[in-house]
Image (tube, rainbow, N blue to C red):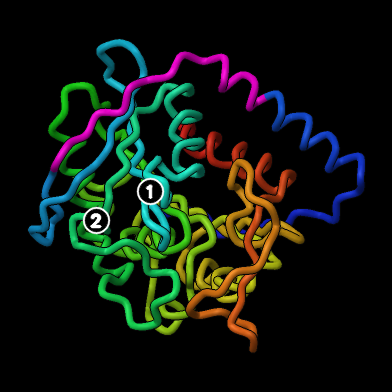
Amino acid sequence: MSSSGTQVEPCRDGATILIARLALATIAMLACAMPARAMEQITFPSRDGTALTGWVVKPAGPGPFPAVVALHGCSGLWRASGGLSARESDWSARLVAAGFVVLLPDSFRPRGIVALCNDRERALRPADRASDAFGAADWFASQPFTKPAGIHLIGWSNGGSTALHVAGNRAAAGPRGFRAVIAFYPGCRVMLKRDWHTRVPTTILQGLADDWTPAAPCEALAQQGGARFVGFAGAYHDFDHPDLRLRERNAAYSQRPDGKVTIGTDAAARSRAISEVMAILRAP
């Protein structure tokens, strides 16, 4: 069981923000200097029986490597232009450079779904997607290049909500479960109404200014269920995106009367979140 606790990033002055931006620029240059790893397309069964497509990228060498299952958000895994979403691409490169093998399951296209962000009545719920995460863990457990008992789960937004459903499932702590769960800006109000408790060490990373998936229910959920909550002052939804201009968009489940939400990169929050994630993944 993870230790519960709340961390809130203090107010940031101009110098702090400048330092964070310089640090991110350095990280980006290092990432560009690293040789690209080819992504391998695989198919594997979700535990609900759906045949899913996934994309695997791993470090050089035979392994075994610690592993990360990475769950996309409500926009899906792919850009409209056809390329891998920038956030997932950025995190995959970073994790592989740190020595982790990454599996990105596509929960949408195999089910005929493009995106769900504007749908209030959704054909696929985060609770349903939990079967996909467990299916990905099953696949990793069968691979010779995966380190035993070394599988982690990260999810963003809709995928973050899915990660919390996984964390509360008894199977999460089983032999084909997860070492740790990290949920970026999930929706927590539904689970807050239930008797949710995490079965494995779980961290929620949330922007305190988020007007799509608000922070308060997630902080309360963490206190209720034994998770760790880390809040970032002034940060909105998608704060860890590598380069997303702060803007508004229409979205289902907006917390505002006009039906819009705010999304965009926050350099300081992104830098700190990267450090938080790496510390969790490298913990003994």
- Residue on which disc 2 sits: 109
**In the visual, does 77 lie left or right of 7?**
left
Q: Earlier in the sequence, mark 1 or mark 2?
A: 1
Category of crowding for the residue at label 1, using alpha-carbon neighbours closer than 10 angstroms: few (below 14), some (14–19), many (at least 20) = some
Label 1 – label 2 distance at C-alpha:
9 Å
Question: Which corner quadrant holds the C terminus?
Answer: top left
Where residue 265 appears, as percent x and y from the top left, is 66, 50
What is the secondary structure assignment of the residue under circle 1? loop
Residue extending farthest to the front is 81
Residue extending farthest to the bottom is 257
Residue in the picture at 58% in, 82% down: 259
Q: Are marks 1 and 2 in contact (CB under 8 Å)?
A: yes
Look at label 2 and name its amino acid. Arg
What is the secondary structure assignment of the residue under circle 2? helix
Residue extending farthest to the top is 61
Q: Nearer the viewer, residue 283 or 192?
A: 192
For residue 6, say whether it is visible.
Answer: no
Where residue 114 appears, as percent x and y from the top left, is 32, 61
- Residue on which disc 1 sits: 78
Q: Is residue 262 magenta?
A: no
Where residue 82 appears, as percent x and y from the top left, is 37, 44
Residue in the picture at 27% in, 64% down: 113
Look at label 1 and name its amino acid. Trp
**In the visual, does 209 lie left or right of 260?**
right
Looking at the rendering, the stretch of residues picked out in magenta corresponds to 27-43
Category of crowding for the residue at label 2, using alpha-carbon neighbours closer than 10 angstroms: few (below 14), some (14–19), many (at least 20) = some
Using the image, determine if residue 196 lies above or below residue 148. Answer: below
